[in-house]
Image (cartoon, grey):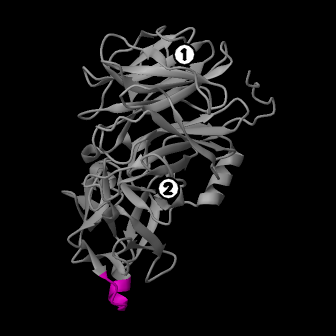
């Protein structure tokens, strides 16, 4: 029997996101364990400059679908699919496993064999089954049809014989299980319809779940549901990952009652997933753990600018022209900026390209370009802006030109320029000039 959590275990006030990365042309693909943190559970800051914090040293030497579980003793275990890249024809019987006290280091790396079938072992999730006094590890496999299998364990080293956990009569993929009081919730993808569904059980036992939600999807395709209870305890969020790296993004819903089959689509203005993130998991962490993660791994040295009225688009350069384009994009670094003290006035800001160091966004004939700093007074002035409260949303930001102070950075037909914006400017003009500064 695993001990109950210590009574003094602090309440969760922040979140950690585990994932791997891919981009449309795979230039940003990395199959190590990546972490991001958030204090609101919506807007995420990648750690370690979006590089992996640990990488498998056995098996395929890569991972997908990492899952973080806080164990009953308050520490963490990380499980992941043993798959390096996109060769889904591999049949691998193992999962990667690490232990961690607070996710600042990872110990005890091992692989555990889950079954002897000639099939895959994908997308693990895990939960504490109090009635058994063990953890259940659930994963996607195929025994003639795509099902969820389960093995039980007390130590994430030895596991019970695999058995079918959920096989509703149609193929399923990517289960995520959350235990809320006496109810077990299982969210999954129905491969026949391409939609996400929720099922529930009062015992969490194999083959005890009943689907209770309508099908959910945003975008063209979706997989990898992530069910998360808000730290405040007053609601839930459901995340879904778009199916392919070409449409690489996360979408989200919210609900005040996870059992009510009532999910509201969240506007993309309200959330920003980690850059290039793919299928992972989200766990609650304490303020102490949040601070330890930031101290150990560091926050990004770069920022992105998200459009207020086109929240799927970010400021980027393309052929030396400033514009906003839909995420994801290649080269993905085109949307990454070092926001440095203004070249003409350190009280302002300038935007230096990450992938073209020494080149900055500047206005020329009111159009925004990416040009090399020639260190002239004119260039420095053209490349300097004052960050002010967002003209459409004071919680966001707008950027006023240093040397043409009645003009603001804005987009028009997706191209960036500076235009005059007075107090009587239209709502659209104000939105065009409002951005979220985000990693």
User: Secondary structure under badge 1?
Assistant: strand
Q: Which residues are magenta?
A: 372-380
Q: Residue 397 location in percent, x, y?
A: 43, 58
Q: Are marks 1 and 2 in contact (CB under 8 Å)?
A: no
User: Secondary structure under badge 2?
Assistant: loop
Q: Which mark is residue 76?
A: none
Confirm whether the magenta stretch covers residue 9.
Answer: no
Confirm whether the magenta stretch covers residue 374.
Answer: yes
> In this rendering, which labeled residue sits more in front, label 1 or label 2?
2
Q: Is residue 333 above or below residue 188?
A: below
Q: Residue at x 39, y 72 (%)?
A: 351
Q: Residue furthest bottom?
A: 376
Position of 391 compared to 158: left or right?
left
Q: Earlier in the sequence, mark 1 or mark 2?
A: 2
Q: Which mark is residue 184?
A: 1
Taking depth in this image into account, of 371 and 248 the one nearest to the observer is: 248
């Amino acid at each position: 029997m695993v001990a109950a959590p210590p009574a003094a275990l602090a309440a969760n006030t922040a979140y950690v996101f585990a994932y791997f990365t891919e981009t449309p042309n795979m230039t940003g693909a990395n199959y190590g364990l990546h972490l991001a943190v958030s204090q609101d559970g919506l807007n995420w800051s990648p750690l370690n400059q979006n590089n992996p914090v640990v990488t498998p040293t056995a098996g395929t030497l890569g991972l997908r679908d990492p899952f973080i579980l806080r164990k009953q003793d308050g520490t963490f275990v990380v499980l992941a699919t043993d798959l390096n890249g996109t060769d889904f024809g591999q049949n691998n019987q193992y999962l990667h496993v690490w232990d961690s006290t607070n996710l600042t280091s990872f110990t005890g790396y091992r692989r555990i064999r889950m079954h002897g079938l000639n099939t895959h072992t994908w997308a693990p999730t895990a939960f504490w089954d109090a009635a058994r006094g063990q953890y259940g590890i659930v994963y996607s496999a195929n025994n003639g049809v795509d099902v969820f299998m389960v093995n039980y364990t007390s130590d994430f080293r030895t596991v019970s014989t695999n058995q079918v956990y959920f096989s509703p009569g149609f193929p399923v993929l990517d289960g995520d299980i959350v235990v809320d009081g006496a109810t077990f919730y299982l969210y999954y993808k129905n491969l026949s319809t391409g939609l996400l569904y929720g099922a529930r059980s009062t015992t969490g036992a194999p083959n005890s779940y009943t689907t209770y939600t309508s099908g959910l999807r945003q975008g063209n395709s979706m997989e990898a549901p992530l069910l998360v209870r808000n730290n405040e305890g007053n609601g839930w969020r459901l995340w879904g990952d778009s199916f392919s790296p070409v449409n690489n993004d996360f979408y989200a819903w919210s609900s005040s009652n996870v059992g009510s089959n009532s999910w509201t689509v969240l506007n993309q203005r309200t959330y920003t997933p980690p850059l290039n993130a793919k299928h992972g998991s989200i766990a609650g962490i304490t303020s102490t753990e949040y601070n330890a993660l930031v101290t150990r791994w560091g926050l990004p040295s770069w920022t992105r600018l998200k459009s207020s009225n086109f929240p799927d688009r970010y400021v980027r350069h393309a052929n030396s022209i400033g514009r906003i384009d839909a995420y994801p994009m290649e080269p993905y670094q085109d949307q990454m900026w070092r926001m440095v003290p203004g070249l003409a006035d350190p009280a302002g800001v300038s935007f230096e390209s990450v992938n073209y160091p020494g080149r900055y966004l500047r206005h020329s004939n009111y159009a925004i370009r990416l040009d090399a700093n020639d260190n002239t007074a004119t260039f420095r002035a053209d490349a300097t802006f004052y960050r002010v409260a967002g003209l459409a949303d004071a919680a966001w930001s707008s950027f006023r030109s240093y040397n043409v102070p009645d003009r603001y950075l804005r987009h028009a037909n997706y191209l960036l320029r500076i235009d005059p914006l007075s107090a009587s400017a239209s709502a659209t003009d104000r939105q065009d000039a409002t951005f979220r500064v985000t990693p």
